[in-house]
Image (cartoon, rainbow, N blue to C red):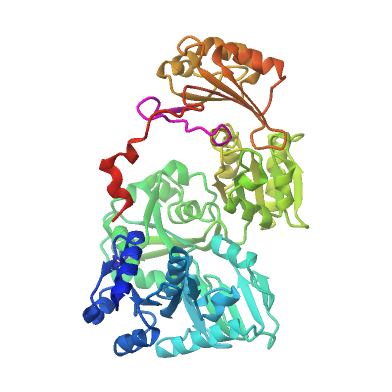
Amino acid sequence: MEQKRKPIAILPVSDRGKELALRIRQAYPEAIIYNYSEAEKAFRESDALIYIGALGICVRSIAPWVKDKHTDPAVVCIDSTGKHVISVLSGHIGGANRLAGELARLLQAEPVITTQSDNMGLWALDTLGHTYNWDMKLRLKGHEEEVKGERFNTLLNHAIALFVNECPVALVLEQDDEGTRFLKETCPPHVHIYIGMTEIPADRYDLIIAVSPYKRTYPALCLQYIPKVLHVGMGCKRDLEVEDTFLINYLYQVLRENRLYPEAIADIDSVVIKAEEKALLRLSEKLQVPFRTYSAEVLDQWTVPNPSETVRRATGTKSVSEASALCAAQGGELVIPKQIYHEGEVQFTLAVAWGKNAGHGHIEIVGAGPGDPELVSVRGKRFLQQADLILYAGSLVPKELTYYAKPEAMVRSSADMNLEEQFHLMKSFYEKGKLVVRLHTGDPCLYGAIQEQMNYFDRYGMSYHITPGISAFQAAAAELRSEFTVPERVQTIILTRGEGRTPVPEKEQLHKLAESQSTMCIYLSATIADKVQAELLQHYAPETPVAVCYKLTWKDQRIFRGELKDLARIVKENNLTLTTLLVVGEAIGHREGLSRLYADEFKHLFRK
């Protein structure tokens, strides 16, 4: 269980410093202001100490209590005028560098950070593992066993020095996830990337940085990060009685024999009838990993090397350990097939699969936003810049968004492709370990037609994720300079479509939704504007404000305002069809009333 964080301590030396301390506490309401006489207490009872006074006094004050950067609190010193914010202690590990940057922005001061990797924009190797939940190991050149104890800290500092001094470094990536994609994206020139276990030239590198669950020897000092990518499938005799240490030791022994790190275990997995099996529950608790179970029907969908009719009769599925490991890994590689332990009454099996991203590609479904290339999310833009294939939704997505692509990427419109053709193109890149971006207009979850694609991805056990985007209704509110909710008048926004060629459930007919008098944003319905107007007029007044929004945020954006009784005429006169959003409701352009958030009883939320 994660240890509860201690509060920030603020230690002002002078009266002027106390004024600054009160200002800082407005931004950090949980912080505690200590008197100068309580300096030792502030140091020992906080995760971060903000010292307000001269740097020399700060250093002399904390010197007797400084022990280790892994346990000492972050210490930041601010001069009493608030002009300089200095990271003093535990810059990386304790977060003093980050805190100094935050405080400098708050006070409009100058941050003083002396950590070389931060100033050069290089990776913080000592905190990189914590950021991505990777364990960290250090091994000497040609040695398989890791360095431990005090020597570990000494060698880690040496590795960091080699890296920041721009000595030749090899980066070995045997996993594809958010962390390794970050490393590839931000790789400095003196680091050479090796994907998988390509042979590294001997004596070429001073340092090797590896991301892998495997225990290997390398031709240089190696700093290795262990990603949690191993999924352990287990089956066992009912009410298995065995010592917890025995199960753990046996599992670790199997992993060591296969040169895999136990720290790479992501979860323990089994069939659903084992959900209350105490031995497996205790194992997951001891390892501090989740215990997940799957139905026999789900497990039976996986092809395994060692199916068993005996297992089927007992559990309803032909495989428990192998199938549950593969299921948890979402179609990854089975690195350890079924191992059987049978001694008297102690009977269990285990198998290990390597997670879905290991050695495979990835598909990111990215919301392109409403049209303006600058309204794609930062995350979406990063994927576009990294992608090996960008498959975008034809005329619905401005081509300018694909200009973020790297020169060697394939950029393809899906306008003339059916679903099968789209999938096979994406799959061809995926199987080569490439990154695929499927670019959809707006936010993919709204009329994005992604469900059919995800069915394919699920069927083939492919790695995919969704990056949300700004939807047209949000762009409409911005362009109309409107808040679509009005205090005490309208508190609901309905996102829907009219019934054209695509049927709409009876309970979601427009005239029924209109009864609520909410702000209604109607997609994909400009071609049936007459029908939309007729249905809405059953409950909205003819004078209800409407906005017809064509190609929101595109270069040729057009917006027409009017009243509901004129909705169909506005659409027809301006020949509006595709990429048109209809907005209806009194919230359009509304300026009356005041949110209760600004009433006196809520003012305490904005001050301390």
Instruction: Residue at 40% x, 19% y: name it.
Output: 516
Front one among 271 and 237:
271
Front residue of 37/426: it is 37
* Residue 485 included in the magenta stretch of the image: yes
Residue 230 horizontal side relative to residue 9, left or right: right
**Is residue 284 located in the magenta-colored stretch of the structure?**
no
Question: Residue 107 lies in what quarter of the image?
Answer: bottom left
Kindly tell me whether residue 51 is visible in this rendering: yes
- Where does the magenta region start and end? 478-494
Is residue 258 in view from this perspective?
Answer: no
**What x and y, as percent, mark residue 337?**
50, 62
Above or below residue 548? Residue 297 is below
- Against 156, residue 5 (above or below) is above
Looking at the image, which is closer to me, 232 or 176? Answer: 176
x and y percentages locating residue 218 in the rendered image:
60, 82
Residue under the point 25% across and 62% down: 241
Identify which residue is drawn at 45% across, 12% down. 539
